[in-house]
Image (cartoon, helix red, strand yellow):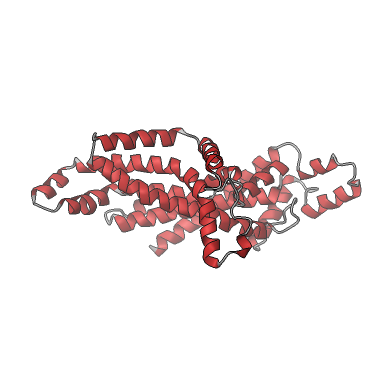
Amino acid sequence: MLLYAGKRIFQGLITLLLASALSFTIIQLAPGNYLDTLRQNPQIAPETLEQLSRQFGLDKPAYEQYFRWLWNILHGNFGESFVYQRTVASLLWERMGNTLILAIIALFANWAIALPLGILAALKQNAPLDKILRVLSYIGQGFPSFITALALLFFAQSVSPLLPVGGMTSINYADLTPLGKFLDIIWHGLLPVFALSITGFAGLQRLTRGQLLDVLRQDYIRTARAKGLPEHRVIYIHALRNAINPLITLLGFEFASLLSGSFITEFFFNWPGLGRLILSAVQSQDLYLIMASLMMGAVMLIVGNLIADILLKVADPRIKLEDLK
């Protein structure tokens, strides 16, 4: 297991290196840079622009900028934000917790609700409940996340002040008790979490139903029932364990999309997370902040796939690690 993990980490480092070079090249292909916006301001002297260009290394060729950035990364320095005049690491650390609150709660909500409903739909195949769940899953997958967010915003506005329209905390947040602060954040996070999880829930529920139906048709399930095993044991020990492998693989990809999936939701609900920060960085061509966010997403993709492979081995002893590509 340790040898396999070490091999995957080494492959991941090479992947990160290639991804960073490709990302830096694509960013450089965009016309202009951060200083072009400042040049349109007549109150900024040309000397100031030249100083900023030297400070951020924008006066160097693109390949020199990349190797300078890569050298700093190897020494734990993610660079300095052009817009905020602060280190990129401090900016990301400041906002990451807010994004993870939404993403992790949405991930747990997806699995806690979609998995039992998928099992129930498979056991009640073609029953009215199964048909209702299928319609709901089609609707959930058919709505883009920004449409869902807008609809929830209109709903919150119509029932206000029962639900907050936006933001992460209330005006009197500082005066609340620790329990009150926790409940206030949960209250503000209800609609963003729902908007973030509805599409993933729909897909996971359909996948669970389909995989379990395939397994329930196998001969060994009929044999287990013929031997007189209790139905709950047949479902949860024999059938579900053999249907879980594709769901574990999906979990690895969901872990990779924890951050990127919440960006649109954060924008609509005015949630102070990484989404709004990185969107403004792209608009202002804040080079090092964009690169750090892209690398963070790539790291989570690699880690998510590694976790999924290890969980597959734990869930199914028949799987050999050397066979996982």
Instruction: Say left or right for 239 vs 116.
Output: left
Tell me the quarter of the picture where residue 7 sits: bottom left
**Residue 59: percent from the left, percent from the top?**
81, 48
Residue displayed at 44% across by 32% down:
142
Residue at the far bottom: name it: 178
Q: How many marks?
A: 0
Residue 263 versus residue 51: which sits nearer the camera? 263
Q: In which quadrant is the N terminus drawn?
A: bottom left
Whether residue 325 appears in this view of the structure is no
Residue displayed at 73% across by 50% down:
64
**Residue 321: percent from the left, percent from the top?**
35, 55
Instruction: Say left or right for 173 vs 141.
Output: right
Residue 191 versus residue 140: which sits nearer the camera? 191
Instruction: Say left or right for 103 vs 44.
Output: left
215 versus 306 height, above or below: above
Residue displayed at 86% across by 48% down:
49
Residue 94 versus residue 58: which sits nearer the camera? 94
Tell me the quarter of the picture where residue 2 sits: bottom left
277 versus 9 height, above or below: above
**Residue 40: percent from the left, percent from the top?**
84, 39
Residue displayed at 73% across by 45% down:
62
Whether residue 303 appears in this view of the structure is yes
**Residue 187: percent from the left, percent from the top?**
51, 53
